[in-house]
């Protein structure tokens, strides 16, 4: 999930704006995630590649 759609429970403002310390902390935490720089399409493509690799591996061992 991207933080641009999240609303802060502390100040009721969008987290992306970073109006309060809670917003800023949440925004920093979300930006530092392992897949934070990837858009949803890239994540879906990565998932498809992983499933294909698993299917190929399962087919070769059977």
Image (cartoon, rainbow, N blue to C red):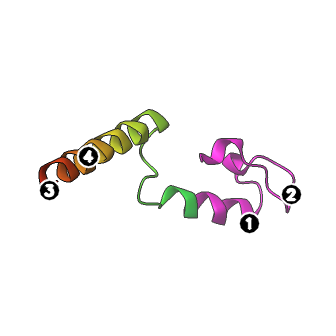
Q: Residue drawn 41% across and 59% down?
A: 34
Instruction: Please say if the residues under marks 4 and 3 sit with CB atoms less than 8 Å apart.
Output: no
Provide the residue span drawn in magenta. 1-28
Q: Is residue 23 magenta?
A: yes
Instruction: Please say if the residues under marks 4 and 1 sit with CB atoms less than 8 Å apart.
Output: no
Relative to residue 32, is residue 44 depicted above or below? above
Which percent across, then down, holds residue 43?
42, 42
Question: According to the image, label 3 marks what residue?
Answer: 61
Which of the two labelled residues, at mark 4 and mark 3, occupies the earlier sequence position? Answer: 4
Viewer-nearest of labels 2 and 3? 3
Report which quarter residue 45 is drawn in.
top left
Say few, some or many: other residues with alpha carbon within 10 Å of mark 1 (under 14 / 14 to 19 / 20 or more).
some
Which percent across, then down, holds residue 58?
22, 52
Q: CA distance from mark 4 to mark 2?
A: 47 Å
Question: According to the image, label 4 marks what residue?
Answer: 55
Viewer-nearest of labels 4 and 3? 3
Q: Residue drawn 42% across and 53% down?
A: 35
Which of the two labelled residues, at mark 2 and mark 1, occupies the earlier sequence position? Answer: 2
Which element carries disc 1, helix, strand or loop?
A: helix
Instruction: Please say if the residues under marks 4 and 2 sit with CB atoms less than 8 Å apart.
Output: no
Which of the two labelled residues, at mark 2 and mark 3, occupies the earlier sequence position? Answer: 2
Numbered tag placed on residue 22 in the rendering: 1
Say few, some or many: other residues with alpha carbon within 10 Å of mark 2 (under 14 / 14 to 19 / 20 or more).
some
Q: CA distance from mark 4 to mark 1?
A: 43 Å
Numbered tag placed on residue 11 in the rendering: 2
Instruction: Please say if the residues under marks 2 and 3 sit with CB atoms less than 8 Å apart.
Output: no
Relative to residue 62, is residue 47 depicted above or below? above
Instruction: Please say if the residues under marks 2 and 1 sit with CB atoms less than 8 Å apart.
Output: yes
Which of the two labelled residues, at mark 4 and mark 2, occupies the earlier sequence position? Answer: 2
């Amino acid at each position: 999930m991207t933080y641009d759609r999240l609303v802060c429970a502390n100040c009721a403002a969008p987290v992306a704006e970073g109006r309060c310390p809670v917003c800023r902390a949440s925004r920093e935490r979300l930006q530092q995630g392992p897949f934070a720089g990837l858009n949803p399409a890239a994540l879906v493509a990565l998932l498809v590649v992983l499933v294909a690799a698993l299917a190929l591996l399962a087919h070769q061992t059977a």
